[in-house]
Image (cartoon, rainbow, N blue to C red):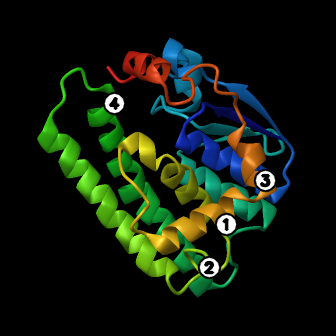
Amino acid sequence: MIELLTSETPNGWKISIALEEMGMSYTWRHIKLSQREQKEEWYTTLNPNGRIPTIIDHDEADFVVFESGAILVYLAEKSGKLLPADRKGRSRVMQWLMFQMSGVGPMMGQANVFLRYAPEKIPYAIERYQREVLRLFGVLDKQLSSHDYVAGEYSIADIALWPWINGHDWSGVSLDEFENLRRWHALIESRPAVKKGLAIPPRVDLGDRTQATVDAGRKFLV
């Protein structure tokens, strides 16, 4: 049984969506970021970085995995799903997974911080990160012009990217100019497992992208 320690953020939703898609049995615990539970000693013993998500594989002597990309790979290998077995196919998925981990996530995260959470609005910083997000969206749009999914077949790369792309409005950017990215977003959004995973955990701590989200976010972004 997998135990998922998570919050209502894109990185958390990656894992709940993946678990639903893979049909794996799991339980979950809501880590309340607004109360800084992710910084408590019991949690940092599991995840030294003090971030979410984290999983505990109780079938494997309570083996702990942190960092969302590493968790996705671990679950894909454990389930035998959403990660090709052949070397080239696996590499394609890993390339786009790394693209999300090193590019889309960090750049959208910074856009979010400077647009929504920073006590002082710095136009240069907001524009710089929004511009980079749009550039990355353009890279994805070009890839999706000739692929249904980013690495060919539906995979953990799509699962890693989708929750971030789904929050584009919170970063203050639009998908209007990216026809292929919009098509891909709608295709994945329609999947039942995605809908189920997006509901875990309920949005009772950070809220649903309102002023309450901003107020809660400022508590753990200090």
- Quarter of the image for the N terminus: give it: top right
Residue in the picture at 72% in, 26% down: 29
Residue at image mark 2: 148
Residue at image mark 3: 193
**67 is higher (above) or lower (below) than 91:** above
Q: Nearer the viewer, mark 4 or mark 3?
A: 4
Along the horizontal axis of the image, is 113 left or right of 30? Answer: left
Residue count near mark 4 (Cα–Cα under 10 Å), binned few <14, some 14–19, many ≥20:
many
- Residue 6 position in % (x across, y down): 63, 32
Q: Which mark is residue 116?
A: 4
- Residue 146 position in % (x across, y down): 52, 87
- Residue 174 position in % (x across, y down): 40, 55
Circle 1: residue type: Leu
User: Which residue is outermost to the top?
Assistant: 35
Let me know if residue 95 appears in the view: no
- Where disc 3 sits, the SS reads helix
Distance from disc 4 to disc 3, alpha carbons, whole Å, reads: 29 Å
Tell me whether circle 4 and circle 3 mark residues in contact (CB < 8 Å). no
- Residue 170 position in % (x across, y down): 42, 40
Distance from disc 1 to disc 2, alpha carbons, whole Å, reads: 9 Å
Residue 65, by quadrant, is: top right
Circle 3: residue type: Ala
Residue count near mark 3 (Cα–Cα under 10 Å), binned few <14, some 14–19, many ≥20:
some
Upstream in the sequence, badge 4 or badge 3?
4
Tell me whether circle 4 and circle 2 mark residues in contact (CB < 8 Å). no
User: Which residue is outermost to the front?
Assistant: 176
Residue 138, by quadrant, is: bottom left
Residue in the picture at 48% in, 31% down: 48
Residue count near mark 2 (Cα–Cα under 10 Å), binned few <14, some 14–19, many ≥20:
some
Circle 2: residue type: Asp
**91 is higher (above) or lower (below) than 42:** below
Along the horizontal axis of the image, is 34 left or right of 53? Answer: left
